[in-house]
Image (spheres, rainbow, N blue to C red):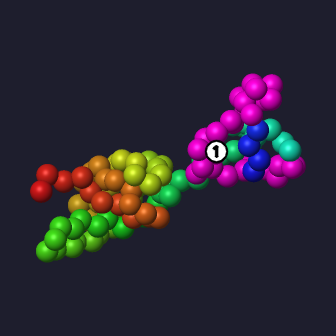
Amino acid sequence: MVLIDRSEVKFHGAFTEREEVIGRKAKVSLASGTVVKARHLETVFLINKEDTVLVVAQNSKLSITTSAIALENGQLGDMISIENLNSKKVLKAIITGRKKVSPITNM
């Protein structure tokens, strides 16, 4: 990836900051020198809707794990809805890693 001065970009919708493309991947091969636009990229999620995820609830003395189904896509740090496989309860959780979440609780 080569960054160029914003004033040199004359194409509507082109990315101008490195941070704008982090967490995305190319949909197709891009030739060297191609001005990268949103239509060239797709978001890469750590968790996809309907993935089975590991739910880890822990404090300084105890750690409890269970499995759930993700009800939405998300990236690291995102809050998503999950459905506990055992109880069928829908909870909110924070994504902490690939297919891993921490439930939001009132401990």
Give the total of numbered labels: 1
Across and down, in percent, residue 88 comes to 27, 57
- Examine the rendered structure and indicate whether residue 85 appears above or below residue 92: below
- Residues rendered magenta in the picture: 5-32
Which quadrant, please, contains the C terminus?
Answer: bottom left
The kind of residue on which mark 1 rests is Arg
Q: Which residue is the site of mark 1?
A: 18
Check residue 2 for magenta coloring.
Answer: no
Q: Is residue 11 visible?
A: no
> In this orientation, which residue lies closer to the viewer: 12 or 48?
12
> In this orientation, which residue lies closer to the viewer: 75 or 90?
75
- Examine the rendered structure and indicate whether residue 77 appears above or below residue 63: above
Tag 1: Cα neighbours inside 10 Å, few (<14), some, or many (≥20)? few
Across and down, in percent, residue 51 comes to 46, 60
State left or right for residue 84 relative to residue 27: left
Tag 1 secondary structure: helix
State left or right for residue 100 relative to residue 45: left
> In this orientation, which residue lies closer to the viewer: 32 or 47?
32
Image point 46% across, 50% down: which residue?
74
Across and down, in percent, residue 83 comes to 32, 55
Which image quadrant is residue 95 in? bottom left
Image point 36% across, 47% down: which residue?
79
Report the predominant secondary structure element of the magenta stretch.
loop
